Amino acid sequence: MKTLSWDQFTKRIHINTTIEKLYWCWSTREGITSWFLKDAIYLRDDAPLNDTDFIKAEDKYTWFWHNWDGKEEGEILETNGKDFIKFSFAGLCEVTVTLEQTKDAVLVSLTQAKIPQDEKSKLEIFYGCSNGWTFWLANLKAYLEHDILLNETKIDLRPFGLAGYEFVNM
């Protein structure tokens, strides 16, 4: 059995859909903004990708969320065009998403690794991102299996100082 540590975490969920649909949800602007982001910009060789273009290694991204004024900038590190994506996230961290067909559904596994070991990173990255990815994977399941979104897009949560830590549907 693996042991838990502060430098990485893994979240998993079974989703009743196809690997192709899940890969589209993670690897195109059109897909990732359907369930996760307010907006996304992908650049390849400094030129923007079209909404339906699949991301590839060395593409750059800028992500924007509902209810958060910040942005996340990073790079796509690896893809295989079907069931594997790795990207930089939260500074020097790396997020790996794998999709595996099981008997009854697709198993989505997300690992965030290379988390710094200082106390701020333990709180903001390990705790914050771990909670965040738990919600977003549940949101992805709700979207694909029931055509609903659980995240808040109508009520502005930004005035709540600890909104990202307190609201479960941020």
Image (tube, rainbow, N blue to C red):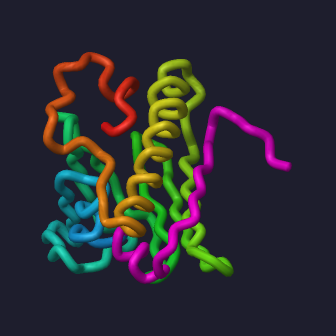
Image location (x, y in percent) of residue 97: 51, 63
- Along the viewing direction, whichever of 129 and 140 lies nearer the viewer: 140
User: Taking 71 as reference, is 165 above or below it?
Assistant: above
User: Taking 76 as reference, is 64 above or below it?
Assistant: above
Q: What residue span does the magenta drawing correspond to?
A: 1-26
User: Taking 80 as reference, is 30 above or below it?
Assistant: above
Image location (x, y in percent) of residue 90: 40, 41
Magenta segment includes 18 = yes
Query: Position of 26 compared to 29: left or right?
Result: right
> Image point 25% across, 53% down: which residue?
37
- Along the viewing direction, whichever of 67 and 152 lies nearer the viewer: 152
**Farthest residue, direction right:** 1
Magenta segment includes 81 = no
Quadrant in which residue 165 is drawn? top left
> Image point 55% across, 72% down: which residue?
99
Query: Position of 117 compared to 44: left or right?
Result: right
